Amino acid sequence: MIGPAMFTNIEALDSSKHGNLLFKPVSNYAFAAGVSSAPISVTEIVEAAKYYPVSFALEEPLLPIALLSLKGPPDPWTKRN
C-alpha cells in the first residue's frame, strides 16, 4: 500500500452529508512526521519534480509518488513538536 494512514479514509464531499463542515487551517504537521512518500496526481508531477524525486509504485495501480525522504521516517520537512 502506498502512503500513510492519513490517506486511508478518503471520501468525496457530499453537501447533504458534509454541509456543516468548515475549513480549519492545520496548526501542527506532526501527523505527517512519519511520511516518507506521498501519492500525487499526474497533473502534479512536473511541479513536484522541481522539489522532490518522483517515482512510480510497482504495485497496481501505477501511481506517481513524491519521495519526501530517502532515509524513511522521520522526514526532514516536519518539526518534532
Image (cartoon, helix red, strand yellow):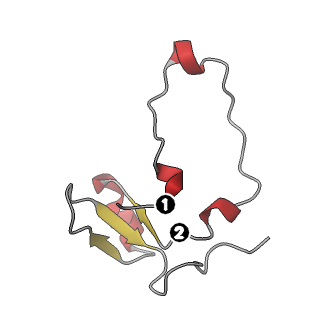
Task: Report x, y in % for residue 65.
Answer: 35, 66
Distance between the Cα atoms at labels 1 and 2? 6 Å
Query: Does residue 42 lie above or below 14 as drawn?
Result: below
Give the residue pinned by disc 2. 35
Q: Residue furthest top?
A: 16
Q: In the figure, is residue 12 to the left or right of 61? A: right
Q: In the figure, is residue 47 to the left or right of 19? A: left
Query: Could you tell me which secondary element the residue under label 1 belongs to?
Result: loop
- Three-letter residue code for mark 2: Val
Give the residue pinned by disc 1. 4
Tell me the quarter of the picture where residue 54 sits: bottom left
Task: Report x, y in % for residue 76.
Answer: 61, 81
Which residue is rendered at x = 21% and y = 55% of the image? Answer: 61
Query: Does residue 12 lie above or below 48 as drawn?
Result: above
Task: Report x, y in % for residue 22.
Answer: 69, 29
Which residue is rendered at x = 42% and y = 76% of the image? Answer: 52
Q: Residue furthest bottom?
A: 71
